[in-house]
Image (cartoon, rainbow, N blue to C red):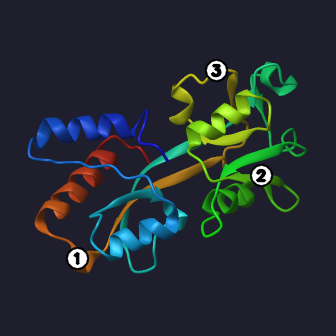
Amino acid sequence: MPSIGEPLGSLLLAGTKSIRTWLLTVSEMNDRDLAAALEERCLDAARMVSHAVLPRAASVPLCRERLVAALPLGHPLAERATVDWDALRCEIILVQGRDESQAARELYASFRGSGARFHSHAASKQCVFALVGAGFGITLATASQSEIAFPGVAFKVIDDPDASIQIALAWLPGLEDATVGRFVAFLRDKARSRRLL
């Protein structure tokens, strides 16, 4: 998931104001590559959906994000204030995915159940939004992703209190150094103090 919008933006801003020595480098990867990068110490920590945290990794929850439906403008559902799962039942759901990593499909299937029609693209989320805008289907996104306008795309809240995901910060505890420990502790404490969970 791209590191855009709230609440992550304000958490990182608070960190740069408090800990001026941070050097943050962002890498977007699929789940398999993310696991390998943590294991090989190419990454110190990873922000990821809680259900995808590696078994050997330690993690702390950072926030909970609502899911929204991204629909093409002009779609009949785009006129509604909110949508529900039943209304999305017959839609083609565009997802990011590669042969070795179908995490988005698995996540969305946990909400939609069997019978959902997925079409995977080995592309960025922005590319998936562009396909939505061009009328190739719909996608699911987090509320923070909906803060950015995409041409031809309408974002609608999914009317289900369980339509949310928990975001965690994960790292390998045996490889943790003091800087990573301070980074994790800072984000954990800020998330708790802001009641983002």
What residue is rendered at 87% in x and 23% in y?
A: 76
What residue is rendered at 12% in x and 40% in y?
A: 18
Q: Does the image show residue 197?
A: yes
Residue type for callout 2: His
The earlier-in-sequence mark between 3 and 2 is 2
* Above/below status of 100 relative to 10: below
Question: Which residue carries the number 1 mark?
Answer: 175
- Is 149 situated left or right of 26 in this image? right
Residue type for callout 3: Pro
Question: Which residue carries the number 3 mark?
Answer: 151
Question: Within the image, what quadrant is residue 71 found in?
Answer: top right
Q: Secondary structure at mark 2?
A: strand
Residue 185 is situated, as x and y percent measured from the top left of the image, at 22, 57
Residue 186 is situated, as x and y percent measured from the top left of the image, at 21, 51
In the rendered structure, find residue 119 and report the number of the disc placed on it: 2
Tell me the distance, in whole angstroms, between the alpha carbons under discs 1 and 2.
37 Å
